Image (cartoon, rainbow, N blue to C red):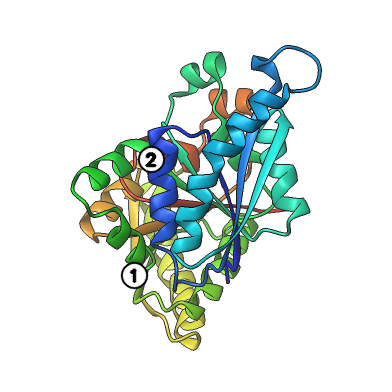
Amino acid sequence: MFKRVLVPTDFTDEADQVLEYVAGLRGRGVEEVVLVHVIDIGRTTAGPVAPKIMEVIEEKLGPRQRRLSEAGFKVFPEILEGVPSTEVLRAADDKDCSLIITGSHGKLPVEEMFFGSVSEAVTRHSDVPVLLLRYSMLSDLAAAGQLNDYAKASFSKILFPTDFTEVSDAAMDELKELSEIGPGEVVTLHVIDTKRSETETENLEQLDACYIDCGRIAEQLAQRKMRATTICEVGDPVQGILAAAEKEDATMIIMGSHGRGMVREWLDGSVSLSILRQTDRPLMVIRRVA
């Protein structure tokens, strides 16, 4: 499944907690880690990076590489220069990675417009799935000494929100591959958006269609030996997903994304990024590539 993953690091405590989470994924299909640090050209002077700076970066990268090696991974360290999100995406492609794992502060749209967000930029444009981990969640788990165990259990119970579009179909294809690492249960969720339905009759018709479509998904998952349950409801999609994740005690949310640009997302809203900004559990976003 996700044999080779890419993990960016900026050497902060938060980034180290992401690495500790990754260490807990050994035995869950992950065997190789491309460990990337990007020297942000927007924060350095023009010209080649001084040898002394490169030496310091290599010294910082060393212990983190050893931590992952001790956890049983084959590690490929990379020091790159450029725009961080661009270089992370380029490295994922060049190194044939099947997943990017990164942390996120979960910035609000206005904050992101002014201050930027590497993780959200990567999510919008990545051709491979991106597993996003809220730093606040990681910090709480690390303080309780539960981070490694939490990672091992991450794929136990998946919440799979779907809108039955090609975007969700692409996410479904990735979800079915997870049968290789044996998630115990998948909860398929469809929330009929009250802002897009006009009458109660229309809602009831969509609910009937939802159970039929979710039934087909359950059959596909059953063929992969994955137990599936279904939730169909009417309401606000973002709040419905967050509530279902809490009620079902999901260990991860996996969903598709259209990969909108920042300005369009700010104006129109994006369910996946809204979930990221509010959820307290890992979120895997799968962008449909045309």
Identify the residue shown where x is 35% and y is 66%: 152
Decide if residue 195 is in sight here: no
For the N terminus, the quadrant is: bottom right
Q: Are marks 1 and 2 in contact (CB under 8 Å)?
A: no
Q: Residues within 10 Å of mark 2 (few under 14, many from 20)?
A: many
> As shown in the figure, which amino acid type bears the numbered disc 2?
Arg
The image shows residue 46 at horizontal and vertical percentages of 78, 13
Task: Residue 134: give its label.
Answer: 2
Nearest to the observer: residue 48 or residue 21: 48
Residue 53 higher or lower than 135, as above or below? above
Horizontal arrangement in the rendering, residue 215 relative to residue 42 (left or right): left
Residue 91 higher or lower than 186, as above or below? above
Identify the residue shown where x is 41% and y is 31%: 105
Say what secondary structure mark 2 lies in: strand
Count of numbered labels shown in the rendering: 2
Decide if residue 102 is in sight here: yes
The image shows residue 268 at horizontal and vertical percentages of 55, 28
What residue is pinned by disc 1? 156
Nearest to the observer: residue 240 or residue 60: 60
Say what secondary structure mark 1 lies in: loop
Task: Residue 222: give its label.
Answer: none
